[in-house]
């Protein structure tokens, strides 16, 4: 599914342009805004356009819009895309680590991803656990983001691996909802 979006960029002292963008959209859009400044406008516009084209190629190749993926998977409207992402993560883990996908654990997890009756927080927890292991998903997410967001993701990935997952696996008192909330909060403050 492709969505055509018109973007109007309003800048003080710079020309405003309206451009239609064709964006792959398997997930719902979030409405976010970020202020921009006009410094070396022509050079800056060229750099932004190159970076945007690079990110769009990566996102199109992955067939999943990976920009701002973590906040969007928290939305209930994106549950089916989250389930698909988790199933693909399981497949990539099997390929990367040469694990037989017919093993009962992976079959159970794959069935879990396909069951619409399973709780959304359990699926989000599976996503975060898989994200820690799935190197290719991390790479695709990093390539889809701007430089600033890449730094944020790097900090989040480190905290996920070094703090959040070990605490969740070692302490039986941590419930899935608390783990998901802790992961989301860690992403927000990264």
Image (cartoon, grey):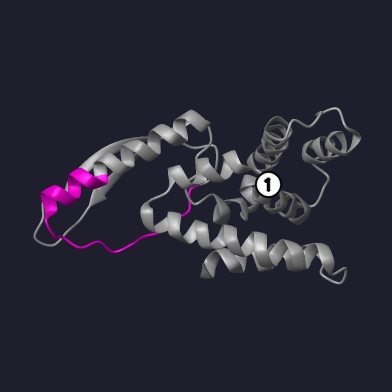
Nearer to the camera, 50 or 100 = 100
Q: Residues within 10 Å of mark 1 (few under 14, many from 20)?
A: some
Residue 76 vs residue 145, the one in the foreground: 145
Q: Is residue 183 above or below residue 6?
A: below
Q: Is residue 43 above or below residue 104?
A: below
Q: Main secondary structure of the magenta part?
A: loop
Residue 170, image x, y percentages:
83, 66
How many tags in the picture? 1
Q: Residue at x 86, y 33 (%)?
A: 107
Location of residue 123 with respect to 94 vertically, above or below: below
Tell me if residue 112 can be seen.
yes
Q: Which residues are magenta?
A: 29-48
In this orientation, which residue lies closer to the viewer: 97 or 11?
97
Q: Residue at x 66, y 64 (%)?
A: 162
Residue 71 is one of the magenta-drawn residues: no
Relative horizontal placement of residue 15, taking residue 63 as reference (left or right): left
Q: Is residue 42 magenta?
A: yes
Q: What residue sits 31% from the left and 43% below the top? A: 51
- The local secondary structure at tag 1 comes to helix
Residue tagged by mark 1?
133
| Residue 156 place in picture, x, y as percent | 56, 61
Q: Is residue 151 left or right of residue 160?
A: left
């Amino acid at each position: 599914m492709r969505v055509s979006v018109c973007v109007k960029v309003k800048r003080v002292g710079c020309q405003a342009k309206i451009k239609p963008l064709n964006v792959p959209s398997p997930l719902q859009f979030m409405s976010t805004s970020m202020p921009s400044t006009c410094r070396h406008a022509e050079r800056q516009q060229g750099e932004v356009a190159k970076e945007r084209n690079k990110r769009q190629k990566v996102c199109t190749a992955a067939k999943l819009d990976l920009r701002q993926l973590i906040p969007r998977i928290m939305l209930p409207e994106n549950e089916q895309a989250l389930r698909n992402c988790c199933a693909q993560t399981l497949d990539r883990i099997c390929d990367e680590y040469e694990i037989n996908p017919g093993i009962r654990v992976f079959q159970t997890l794959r069935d879990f991803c396909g069951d619409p009756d399973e709780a959304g927080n359990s699926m989000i927890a599976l996503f975060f656990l898989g994200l820690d292991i799935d190197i290719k998903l991390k790479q695709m997410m990093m390539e889809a983001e701007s430089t600033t967001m890449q730094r944020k993701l790097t900090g989040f990935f480190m905290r996920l691996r070094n703090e959040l997952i070990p605490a969740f696996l070692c302490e039986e008192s941590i419930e899935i909802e608390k783990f998901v909330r802790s992961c989301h909060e860690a992403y927000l403050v990264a």
